[in-house]
Image (cartoon, helix red, strand yellow):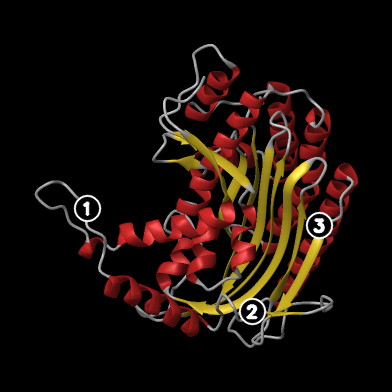
Amino acid sequence: QKSRGAHREVGLGMLGLALSAACTAFLATSSIGNNAHGVVHRPRTSVLLAEAAAATDEQKASGISWDSHEYVEKAPDTLVRDDDMSGANMDMRRRFEENCRRAQNNICNAVSELDGTPFKEDVWTRPGGGGGISRVLSNGNVFEKAGCSLSVVYGSMPQDALQSATSRGADRAKGYAEGERVPFFACGLSSVMHPRNPMAPTMHFNYRYFETDGGAWWFGGGSDITPAYLFEEDIQHFHQTYKDVCDKHDPEYYSKFKKWADEYFTIKHRGETRGLGGIFFDDQNDREPEKIFAFSKDCLDALVPAYLPIVAKHKDDAFTQQQKEWQLMRRGRYVEFNLVYDRGTVFGLKTGGRIESILMSLPETARWEYNHSPAEGTPEAEIMDAFKNPREWVK
């Protein structure tokens, strides 16, 4: 199953910068053209400088920027400030943050116990309110990298950025004229965990609560699993755990949110999904906020029993160098999705979020092989079929 071309492993700190520069060059289409020989010329320097200046101006207008945070030694009791924003639900804001902190502690403690390595914690605040608590475990015994980050954000954003934070055309800027910036509040807990062993799957979750000026509010979230090798009983366990949570709150939730996850986590330019799904939901405000909050809370509490037993089962499995290389290629797909399509990444970059938090989801190592295709009848080909043809894992 060797590639027909050369291959290399890439440190993702440099990769993020390289892809960002490449995307900027590609998107500056007004200055890109082909000559008679089909050679693509690089965009004019003035165009790139203008784009950089526009991005800086956007950050200033939002009230937050990539470097506007201040590190503190200890997290304050709450990162939620008193707010006179029209329609602000202060009780829900505080309770959602409190639950995120509780879940962050529980999840990090369980992961650290399995790995035998502590998380490193960074705490920061912003002058205008909000801040975050990031915890990252690196170079562990079980996990190459595991991160779990809490963020509380205040600011204003253009309506296109607000649109990137929602789904399926939801209008969260009602009452604002075209071009006006929309004040917002957001609180969320997100996590990605990349095990060392290629038989143990990567996992991601994110649960969030938004409000905009004027009283618009909604919840979003989900948990999904990304294996390099297919063990059907593991995927069934993960999906069944979340189906049980969904059924407790609404018998239609699982089928709806499972399908949404399959659609959302599609890498369109590859014609395959990032992993084997789970649940995903957004723009949820169709019932009392208390009921959706309770669902979000139960989803967070389900993460440890849904995921960690699978990692514990496979963390010491034997594997070959070729299987490790396949895992790194699947991580490459993970990177492609996160940098090109992920709504949270786009929202964070548009609103001047903390870069280390935005890119926390990326693995430390990944791999791209030119025109690689797994041989028929192999385990790699088996899971590729599942990536290209989403399956039903539970009844």
Of callouts 1 and 2, the N-terminal one: 1
Using the numbered discs, state the Cα–Cα distance from disc 1 to disc 2 in whole angstroms: 51 Å
In the image, what residue type sits under mark 3?
Answer: Ala
Of callouts 3 and 1, the N-terminal one: 1
Q: Return the x and y of residue 227 as percentages of the image width and height.
A: 64, 32
Q: Which mark is residue 40?
A: 1
State yes or no: discs 3 and 2 in contact (Cβ < 8 Å): no
Q: Which mark is residue 88?
A: 2
Between disc 3 and disc 1, the foreground one is 1
Using the numbered discs, state the Cα–Cα distance from disc 3 to disc 1 in whole angstroms: 50 Å
Residue reaching furthest to the top: 377
**Secondary element type, mark 1:** loop
328 relative to 29 in the view: left or right = right
Graded by Cα atoms within 10 Å as few (under 14), some (14 to 19) or many (20 or more), the crowding at tag 2 reads many
Query: Compared with residue 283, is residue 151 higher up or lower down, i.e. above or below?
Result: below
Q: Which mark is residue 103?
A: 3
Query: Compared with residue 30, is residue 282 higher up or lower down, i.e. above or below?
Result: above
Residue at 65%, 30% in the rendered image: 324
In the image, what residue type sits under mark 2?
Answer: Ala
Query: Compared with residue 117, is residue 330 higher up or lower down, i.e. above or below?
Result: above
In the image, what residue type sits under mark 1?
Answer: Val
**Secondary element type, mark 3:** helix
